[in-house]
Image (cartoon, grey):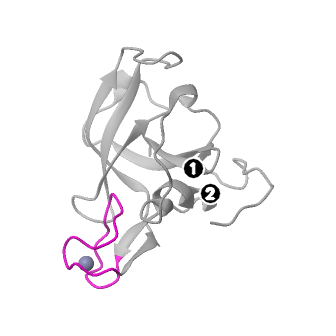
Amino acid sequence: MKHTDEKPTRDSNPRLLSADPIAETRILPPVTEANAAFWTSGASGTWQLPRCGDCRTFIHPGQPLCPLCLTDTLRPEPVTGNGTVFTYTINRYPWLPGWKVPFVAAVVELDDQPRLRVTANLVDVEPEDVTIGMRVTVAFIHTDDRWVPVFRPA
Ligand SMILES: [Zn+2]
């Protein structure tokens, strides 16, 4: 990952959001080789997910081997970041101090491949307005060394 002292802005990355609805309490896993693209590629505004170099299947979550052909040729490749809401839930209870409720946790199926699904928060939409099949696009919340992918209405 390329590091710079310059803080990314919405001008340099239009997919970058300024506020995280659960920033104070968002719990993130360690960045590993297998998941680095998921957490950091948003810095460029182009999201990337691991893709098998042999069978060309995007694999999420990232892992050392392709589960379909068992090769170790997974490399990050760009995805559109566009998709549809496959399912979702509205969290209305502040399970941790600092959570701003209600918020939406959704499973989004990306346009790039059937059944390529990502779990993430939906932002910039009232929870009551979310529907299954709703068109969404990825955006990112920058926090420390991560660009946390979230989705908003397309
Ligand atoms: Zn494969």
User: Is 34 a magenta residue?
Assistant: no
Residue at the location (39% across, 17% down)? 95
Q: Which mark is residue 41?
A: none
Q: Residue at x 42, y 15 (%)?
A: 94
Q: Main secondary structure of the magenta part?
A: loop
Percent from the top left, x then y, of residue 139?
52, 47
- Identify the secondary structure beneath mark 2: helix
Q: In the depicted view, which residue is nearer to us: 94 or 127? A: 94
Which residue is drawn at the image coordinates 36% and 73% (left, top)? 51
In the drawing, what numbered circle is on residue 43?
A: 2
Q: Earlier in the sequence, mark 2 or mark 1?
A: 2
Measuring 45% from the left and 71% from the top, which residue is drawn there?
76
Q: Position of residue 32 (x, y in %)?
A: 47, 60
Q: Give the magenta range.
A: 52-72
Q: Is residue 58 magenta?
A: yes
**Residue 130 locus on image (x, y percent):** 33, 31
State the image quarter where residue 101 is shown. top left
- Give residue 147's mark: 1
Of the pair 12 and 54, the residue shown nearer to us: 54
**Residue type highlighted by circle 1:** Trp
Q: Amino acid at mark 2?
A: Ala
Would you say the residues marked 2 and 1 are in contact, meaning their CB atoms lie under 8 Å apart?
yes
Name the residue nearer the viewer: 73 or 76.
Answer: 73
User: What is the tally of numbered marks visible in this picture?
Assistant: 2
Depicted 80 relative to depicted 147: above or below:
below
Residue in front for this viewpoint, 17 or 91: 91
Q: CA distance from mark 2 to mark 1?
A: 6 Å
